[in-house]
Image: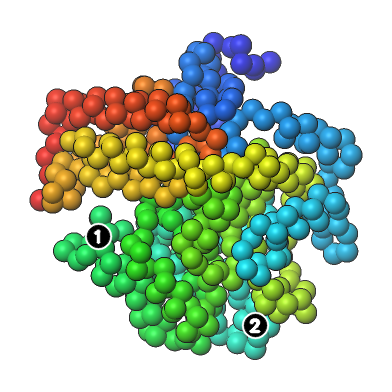
Amino acid sequence: AITNHMPTAELQALDSAHHMHPFTNGDELAAKGARVITRAKGVYLTDSEGVEILDGMAGLWCVNIGYGRDELAEVAARQMRELPYYNTFFQTTHVPAIALASKIAELAPGDLNHVFFAAGGSEANDTNIRMVRTYWDAKGKPDKKIIISRKNAYHGSSMGSASLGGMAGMHAQGGMPIPDIHHINQPDWWAEGGDMTPEAFGLARAQELEAAIQDLGEDRVAAFIAEPVQGAGGVIVAPDSYWPEIQRICDKYEILLIADEVITGFGRTGNWFGCQTLNIRPDIMTIAKGLSSGYQPVGGSVVSDEVAKTLGGVEFNHGYTYSGHPVAAAVALENLRILEEEGIVDRVRAETAPYLAEKWHSLGDHPLVGETRIVGMMASLALTPDKASRAKFASDPGTVGYICRERCFANNLIMRHVGDRMVISPPLVITKAEIDTLIDRARRALDECHAQLRERDLLKMAS
Ligand code: PLP
């Protein structure tokens, strides 16, 4: 049998022989060998060599309550014994789905009171594409089909959700985007703001939505989708002027606003949802990740009374085998109980996020660090050869970020790179002492990265 007790090299060889990793060059990984993670507790992972690694990314932005909570394991086992599976197609239901949908409706702002379940964020965004088009059909406006999104957005990996996303590298593989998806520019002032003030730039980027609606035709645009804070694109926090203008435009032209809260939901920004932090009033929210803290694959679309009422008279021919899966639903419900009863979201807002912000901004004095950005428990820093001019490196984008990520890894810190930008999104239960450790390791990694760049003559600016 293949177990944790096998030598790491043997596990790595089997891994590269049979396991295809997402978003990974298989040949490169085979040459290097994947780090084998065997256990986790709190904010720490343990690898097959017994080394503890501080997980600055909460897995993939999802393990909000931290690793190793027995309560969730117990709920899963109990639910598996009682009712391991049943679906909610046609005319059946079960208590875990009822209870989870009710709890989400209670936590979600405004009249977002109805949940269509999926097994993750990609599936939920596929639901959204079909749902908003079906909504406008039901309203007698079948030409409203186009969904406007943003370049460099991430909304998932399926054909539909990756088409909504604006990642050029993803669109280049497999014939995307699908028809009737349109992308405007992202509000990334550091990278793209040029000589404009952040406020003027934020307004200009929001007004691209209005220009696109006018260009494509108000009667043809169904919805606008965006992450309240772009996550996978590099924790891009829009200037303050951006969201009020987006909200005004969606209201004016009767465009459904979809907030993709897959990362920003369930406490990540210091409120239950990112739209509360940013004062956005979405018609639909995409949720996943922190909904179950990653302990089970579950996601969904949370929709307003108006959208649900309009769809009420339609047989929406859509659903997944695992929509409302009872074990996933029971585990998610227990996760929400822990987030709420232990005051984790409140503690993030009042204590740990301000503490992390202070420490994170202190990295701004490092010679390699340009802008430091943070909202709640998601943060990024731009690596630059010259802060004053916000210069990019002369090397291929991502070369420096990759070196920095490797130095973090060597210092037993998981920090991700997006191009030449470093991002973190730690478990929400991280303590102040653990934040100190994270920052110490990050600074050490930055120093080592700087030394390597100097040695390899990579500190040159792009012309
Ligand atoms: N939407 C956003 C904002 C995400 O960050 C992600 C995943 O990172 C997704 C959707 C896709 O979710 P999943 O990987 O669960 O399909």
State whether residue 326 is above or below residue 108. above
Left or right: 201, with 152 as reference point = left
**Residue at horizontal 34 percent and vertical 36 percent from the top:** 359
Instruction: Answer yes or no: is residue 105 visible.
Output: yes
- Measured Cα–Cα span from mark 2 to mark 1: 38 Å
Q: Is mark 1 within 8 Å of ligand 1?
A: no
**Circle 2 Cα neighbour tier, 10 Å, few/some/many (<14 / 14–19 / ≥20):** some
**Residue at horizontal 42 percent and vertical 55 percent from the top:** 230
Q: Earlier in the sequence, mark 2 or mark 1?
A: 2
Residue 192, picture quadrant: bottom left
Instruction: Answer yes or no: is residue 165 visible.
Output: no
State whether residue 85 is above or below residue 91. above
Q: Amino acid at mark 1?
A: Glu
Of the two numbered discs 2 and 1 in the rendering, the one whose residue sits closer to the viewer: 1
State whether residue 68 is above or below residue 146. above
Provide the secondary structure element on which disc 2 rests.
helix
Of the pair 119 and 372, the residue shown nearer to us: 372
Q: Which mark is residue 192?
A: 1
Q: Amino acid at mark 2?
A: Asp
